[in-house]
Amino acid sequence: MKKTEKQKEYDLIVIGGGPSGMMMAGRACELGARVLILEKNKHLGKKLQITGGGRCNITNAEFDVRKFLSNFPESKEFLFSPFSKFSSKDTFTFFEKRKLPLVIEARKRAFPESQKADDVFKVLEKYIKTGGGEIKTDVQVVKMSKNGNKIFSVETKNGEKYFAKNFAIATGGASASWTGSTGDGFKWLKKLGHTIKEPNANLVPLTTNDKWIHRISGLTLSFMTIRFIQENKTKLKKTGKILFTHFGVSGPLILNSAYEVKKLLEKCPVTASIDMFPDTEENDLDKRVLKLFEKNKNKILKNIFPELIQKNLALEILDLPDINLSEREANSITKLERKNLVKKLKNLTFEITGTLGLDKAIISDGGIVLEEVNFKNMSSKIYSNLYLLGDILNINRPSGGFSLQLCWTTGWTAGTDVGEKVAQKKKN
Ligand SMILES: Cc1cc2nc3c(=O)[nH]c(=O)nc-3n(C[C@H](O)[C@H](O)[C@H](O)COP(=O)(O)OP(=O)(O)OC[C@H]3O[C@@H](n4cnc5c(N)ncnc54)[C@H](O)[C@@H]3O)c2cc1C
């Protein structure tokens, strides 16, 4: 394909208007590059606008880069270089300079003070527009063409062709595909000769077929310990908050366990075990239960047990087939039955059947393998004018603002590289 004289050539075409693409486009514009951003949705930032339940957990306020990157166990060695250019501290400076103050909540999660993801989007949109960037929405890129080891052009579904000196694939991963991230970038990269690790649901709720869990949907246990057990061995243990849902369990603690649980499930079944009183020894808990029974000798258990734990959960536990005590009077409970009940509170088990899958996942793992990316400027090691950002990279990480920080860091680093190349050319 040859360019005609009339066809405009940009310094940079960014495919995908998510947070990483918007950051790169804005930064390159700021440094004087002519930038076009192509987005297949009707507006940019669809996924960004639903982050953090609409509040946008914009970054994690761990300002020590080493500590921050300890959350990226498999990829931190690659990430030191871009994070030395743009870290979570820089994210604070960037947004606060643009009149979007941030606040820090539990676990160092940072949010805009306004609690609106839309405000984050507006800052980025203004950043691009102020720099003179062009935005085309409702435009789906379907093909990338190369010339030797350079990307040459992109084609859209409507048959239009766009040319640039540099390109960025910022098409996201494969989670929540209804937001637009349908894995297109992975297909192009494969065709271009890159290696792609198949995307898989990550940071995703876990499912169970145990109906009593489904029935307590909406209930939260704020401080408990959950163990994931395989072949009678505890493989993973975490303490925190768990949310019960109509399909299984969720909440940050579960989302952050999903990656490892998923790997375990590939081998054989996994049982989850909740200790509802992690700070209380079994003997002491037994004493508490005994006291409760003695105080309410003639009452039936379903009326007194909610004094110890939330009502809905209390009733479900009492009705479990191996407990079956809800209609019994406290004074009729044998020592063995009481001890079994106490054991249940310390070891409430259910089978994990899987995850809710890619469409309900916060992120997908998988993507372009990191060895094929030059992390100094986020370019492809095969095509020096092709940049790779955000969720397109095969980087596992926990929830808590780490995903968006990855977008800010990779977008800024890549945008700076293109901007500086353009500025250098203008000088010469
Ligand atoms: C429900 C939910 C909540 C989340 N909350 C948080 C949070 O609070 N904090 C956090 O750090 N992370 C959060 N994340 C993760 C975070 O949103 C992602 O990591 C981030 O959006 C990835 O950005 P990206 O720029 O790589 O890709 P995306 O945001 O996925 O954007 C990619 C864009 O490319 C476009 N595109 C794709 N293919 C084409 C094509 N062929 N042509 C043109 N355009 C195309 C898509 O339409 C899309 O707009 C959340 C994710 C979900 C699903």
Image (cartoon, grey):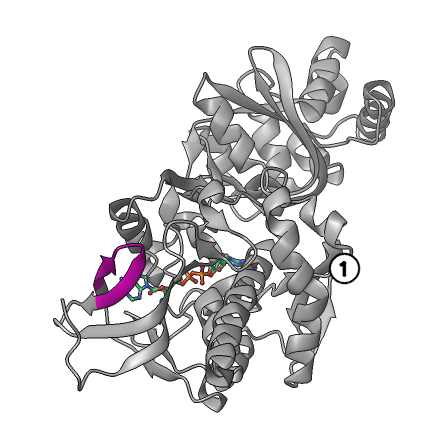
Q: In which quarter of the image is the N terminus?
A: bottom left
Q: Looking at the image, which residue is at 45% across and 57% down?
A: 379
Q: Residue at x 75, y 27 (%)?
A: 298
Residue 81 shown in magenta: no
Task: Kindly report the secondary structure that dominates the magenta region of the rendered protein.
Answer: strand
Q: Is residue 393 left or right of residue 141?
A: right
Image spot of residue 104 (x, y percent): 74, 66
Seen in the picture, residue 257 relative to 399 is either above or below; the reply is above
What is the three-letter code of the residue carrying label 1? Phe
- Whether residue 17 is visible here, answered yes or no, is yes
**Image check: 31 left or right of 300?**
left
Q: Does the magenta stretch include residue 143?
A: yes
In the picture shown, does residue 310 fall above or below 390? Answer: above
Q: Nearer the viewer, residue 90 or 381?
A: 381
Extent of the magenta region: 142-154
Against 291, is 310 above or below? below
Name the side, left or right, on which 58 lies relative to 214: right
Residue 210, position as x, y percentages in the image: 46, 28
Residue at (74, 11) in percent of width and height:
334
Q: Where is residue 402 in the image (x, y as percent from the top left)?
A: 61, 54
**Ligand 1 picture quarter:** bottom left
User: Residue 299, located in which quarter of the rendered image?
Assistant: top right
Rendered image quadrant of residue 397? top right
